[in-house]
Amino acid sequence: MWTLEPGAELIVGGAAWRVQSCLPHLGRVTLIDEEGGSWKTSVSELIHRPDCRPSTRTRTDLSAADRGRQPKAMDDLKQVERDIVTLRLEHLREVETGYRSGDPLDALPHEPRPQYDPDTTTLTQRRLAKVQELRRAAAEAPTQAKTNGLHRVSLRTLVRWDTGRGKSGPVGVADDRWLREASGHKISPELREALFAVHAEAQHRSKLTMREKERLIHQYMREVFGSEDNAKSADVQEVEIPGYDTLRAIWKDWFGSDGARQRYARSAAKAKGYATGQHVVVHRPGQVVALDTMLLPVKVLENVFGDPVSVHLTLALDVYTRSIVAFRLSLVSDTSMDVAMVLRDMMMPLPMRPDWGKDMEWAYPGVPGTVVADFAGHEVAGLPFFAPETVTTDHGSVYRNHHLVEVQRVIKANIKPSRVLRPTDKWSVERTFGAIQSLVFGILPGYQGIDTADRGVDPEADACLTVAEMEHLIATWVVKIWQNRRFGSYAPSWDPSGAHSPNSLFAAAMAQGGFALRIPSAELYYQLLPRHKVMIHGKRGVKIKNLWYDGDALDPYRGELSRRGGRHKNKYVFHRDPRDPCFVFFQDPRTHDWHTLRWTGLPQDGEMPAFSDARVREAMRELRKRGLAPKADAELLPVLLELIGGNVPVDQWPTQLSKKQRTEHAREVAQAAAAAADRPSDAIKREPPTRPVAIPAAREGSEDGKVVPLRPKERAQQVHDAVNGERQRRREAAVPDQLLPPPDLSERLRTSSLLALPDDDSDDDITAGEAEEEASQ
């Protein structure tokens, strides 16, 4: 039943309207809103509006504990309060039926008592008898009666309990004071102003304790609003200030704890002014992928000289399923190229490795493993792969450059840095790093600990795993252990108490929303490489980063403009892998096929030691220092090889090469090997190397990269052979025809002398004709 008397409140379309006047004989109602606007309507329109209802704040049929809130229930009461409600219900049932249980079949031996017999007494007589009984009990045991709330029971109390039980059930007998509104502390406007003023001052000053803030609050209240000690005027009343504990509770409830440092608290407060207040709810795989890099806390052996080095681990974690979808190990600090390859890895299925069993194969329901293997071209391991939608990174320069912007466009993903001082944006990958460190890295030889004080005697001497072996160990652990590990406190919101793992969550997501089986082609590698816009020289090819590249694919376009407009007008686009400058890649404008162009200074046969962009820049500086201006890369090769060899004579290099120089060479070899592993298999057909080259195991998982590391002497011999081979090639190219050796001096005299006699053994073979011819001569 609605109450339309003046002052009653109605909720119409989600807005509050208060009844100003009601004319029931005309059926007209006048409503006003909170801003004072008036609305005249009819009772019939209000009743038939589906979005109109009486406000619970003014409904008279609701108890005080239900106004403006959800209805109360027995679950809201404490156990002691439930016992009191049960006792009151027994008294009410005895008044109504004469039996404590309310059922004659479950009557006690002395029931019904004469004063509660419903056959001989009325309901009012039984209620009055119950009042007299409860008062006698209160006189005999006042403490117990006061505890149960029966010491002041009257006839009106019993009627009110009975009415409340009829409306709300057993909870209607409960005292409304037990369920009163949890409004918190009563704060006056003056105290509220003082709290916000002190909070603003505390952010500006150095860090203050709560005791010091309490004194500032008292100072503000005394000087602004006055107190009994120092009032501004007699008309100003003293404002009551709560105690320290109350102020501390209010401060923590309003402004949070004071655990942050001052500089971080100030920056967080500044960032809060730009916050939108909207939260991203991750509900499917690939929606948000967290990407981060850490220094591996385990010393490993590099694959060239076998020296212990530190490597960087780049990890990509799916936030929804907590699956480690991709990772990479690099000897140097990660670059934008490494990040691009990690993004490419998470889009491609992980191939099975020779030592992996059937339990590590693709086993997700909905998509058979044979279908995935048919698309991928190989057997697929049980690791999710998908195209990411949003990639969250930190604010490192490797994630903020033009190359990553182009990669973002190619893979159609959003690469967004996390908010400043907001660890919740990337906390999942940070916790994953900690979990891997405690579960795997801590028990490996060569572990360095989290602090220098906790480090072992000699972690470098304890290192026994190579980079390739460490990569294989992490890959096996991820597929076999991490993906099947049960979650502790990171279960999904729709089943927080269930047992889930990354694999089970991915399988559930496939069952709910399906799975898009999209595997990128091999051309994605070329598209993710940095772009260079240059002109094609008619004879020499193209010049990129001080190096000339040429190939047969440029023949149709030599001396021809590309007809491209814009900023790079008439230039061609070339893609180059910074990890291996020996090759660049060119997409034919007509056929759109990809072609590989070789560095013109690269030897045609034999092996070229690995080098990087940094080595090329060092070679150019050395050339400028020597005053040389080479016209061809063939003249640049000896200088480059000399720098690769350690800038010392080859015969002295094995003994003079320092550990720093060995590490630099090992890093260049690792980068070149990683670039070769990322390229499609048919991109470059190299000659087989004459001696073993260290190539770390790539994502394909083959054991071909597991080789014997080179010793310094072998590395020196490798450079020596490369130099001699290049010199021989240049000599042979200068003289294409083979020259005959000159004859001996004695043979020349015998052929030109007139007194030379024929050999004895030739007289028997002379013919008659030949003798006559000699005689005539």
Image (cartoon, rainbow, N blue to C red):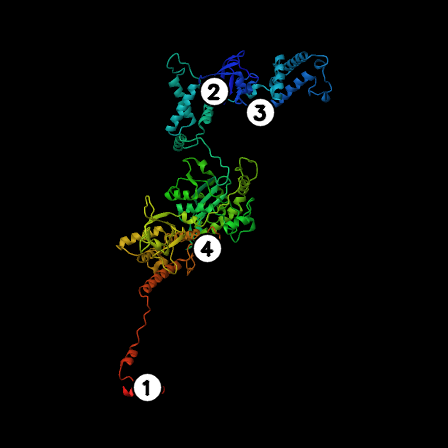
Please name the residue that numbered disc 3 is placed on. Answer: 76
Q: Earlier in the sequence, mark 1 or mark 2?
A: 2
Q: Where is residue 245 in the image (x, y as percent from the top left)?
A: 47, 24
Please name the residue that numbered disc 2 is placed on. Answer: 186
Cα distance between the residues tagged 3 and 4: 67 Å
Q: Nearer the viewer, mark 1 or mark 2?
A: 1
Is 428 or 19 nearer to us in this picture? 19
Cα distance between the residues tagged 2 and 3: 23 Å
Q: Which of marks 2 and 3 is in front?
A: 3
What's under tag 1, amino acid-wise? Glu
Q: Which of marks 4 and 1 is nearer the N terminus?
A: 4
Q: Which of marks 4 and 2 is in front?
A: 4
Q: In this view, does 39 lie above or below 300?
A: above
- Mark 3 neighbour class, 10 Å CA radius: few under 14, some 14 to 19, many 20 or more: few
Query: In the rendering, which numbered label is found on residue 705?
Result: 4
Please name the residue that numbered disc 1 is placed on. Answer: 770
What's under tag 3, amino acid-wise? Asp
